[in-house]
Image: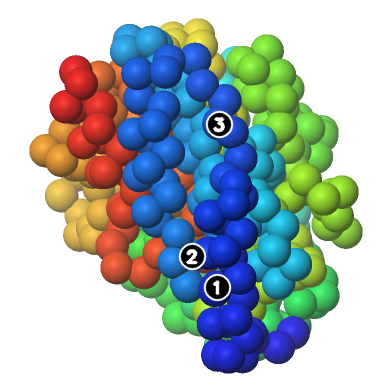
Amino acid sequence: MKPLKPFLKLYLFVAFLMLLSVGCKTPPTNQNNKFNSQFQSVIDGEISENIPGILVNITSPKLGVEWSGASGLADWEQKVAIGPDQTFRIASVTKTFVAATVLRLWEDNKLSLDDFISKYISLEHAKILEEGGYSPNKITIRHLLSHTSGLGDHTNSGKYTVDFLKDRHIWSRTETLIDLVTLMEPAGELGAQFSYSDTGYVLLGEIIEKITGKSMGDAMLEQLQLKKLGLKDTYMEEFDGDFTGKRIHQYHEGFDTYNFHPSLDYFGGGGLLSTSHDLSRFFISLFNHEVYRNQSTLDTMLTSVLNGAEQTMDYRFGIWRIEINGKEAYTHTGFWGTQVVYIPEIETAISANYSQRWTDSRIAPVIPKILEVIEKED
């Protein structure tokens, strides 16, 4: 997979601007015209030579707003306009769904958060971890959820990067664990610090499958009742990839990753396809008591369990706390350029997907700008 050459990038960008000027923008879905033109103007302003396309949703029952918009291209090379209902690989935002599924199983007394993972993972995987210096009979589900297990992260290895660029390399859950123990050092002592680990959520995916007897994708759909919540376009990508045309092209440092095999990020650390609407809807549902039966379950999800341990981000269970424009928010991001936030003060969810990831902050640049529009009218 060759990167786009600089002159080709420039040609396509100029061609895109010409296309944009004659109506490349797709009409948004909107239930409140008060913000329509302002939201569209904000997302149009995000398009650049490095950002070929963007999808955004704002959902706020309190403010009476539900708006989905798009700007730019779904396919940079073919100059195909992007639509607000198109799907994309959400990468690590999948972790929020995985954590919520684990907590639903906890509500149903199917597991304890303090169960050791050796109770659920295969003997083969337990042995791999032991040979790497880990103790699956001491690591708990709680440790995995909060990234305090001491596990390294297989995605940080040089081999992963090399295989990542082989666009049809097919991964397995076992391979990710082998790479973890052969290529990466432990991140620290068990429970002593926060260290983000995709591999930990790969193990949570296995635990979900063991308990439910279903694939991780089917288990999430069932346990979280995604269809009932109105998430019609959120599901695990087919293992061989979704090439129906609904999924947008996503780029990494100029590479078109459309043909990259989904198994590179599939087993719990990522794997879901979704839309901007569905992501906002899920976060609204989480905080509006539609996912869990008990408020205490949401409280558990949002409570830091580090107890003073060293941490680099205020992570909870599959979600972390940030501030945006001085307001408390809960969020998760995905590698390809996805972010979802929920702002309790105004009961509003904002989701954004850039078709090539922004690079200058942990917060997608469009989100504070959208929030400014809302604040001016609030």
Q: Nearer the viewer, mark 3 or mark 2?
A: 3
Question: Residue 57: where, in percent of width, then height?
Answer: 48, 33
- Left or right: residue 180 compared with residue 219: left
The answer to which of 120 and 256 lies nearer the viewer is 256
Depicted 347 relative to depicted 41: above or below = above
Q: Quadrant of the C terminus?
A: top left
Disc on res. 28: 3
* Residue located at (11% from left, 38% from top): 326
Horizontal side of residue 245 vs 235, given as left or right: right
- Rounded to the nearest angstrom, the CA distance separating label 1 from label 2 is 10 Å
The residue positioned 37% from the left and 53% from the top of the image is 45
Residue at position x 51%, y 21% in the image = 30
Distance between the alpha carbons at the discs numbered 3 and 2: 19 Å
Residue 34 placed where, x, y %?
35, 18
Q: Could you say whether the residue bearing mark 2 is in a helix, strand or loop?
A: loop
Q: Which percent across, then down, holds residue 244? A: 87, 49
Q: Which residue is mark 1?
A: 13
SS state under label 3: loop
Q: Is residue 318 above or below residue 9?
A: above
Can residue 78 be seen in this snapshot?
yes
Q: Indicate which disc, 1 or 2, sits on the residue closer to the N terminus.
A: 1
Give the residue type at disc 1.
Phe
Local SS, label 1: helix
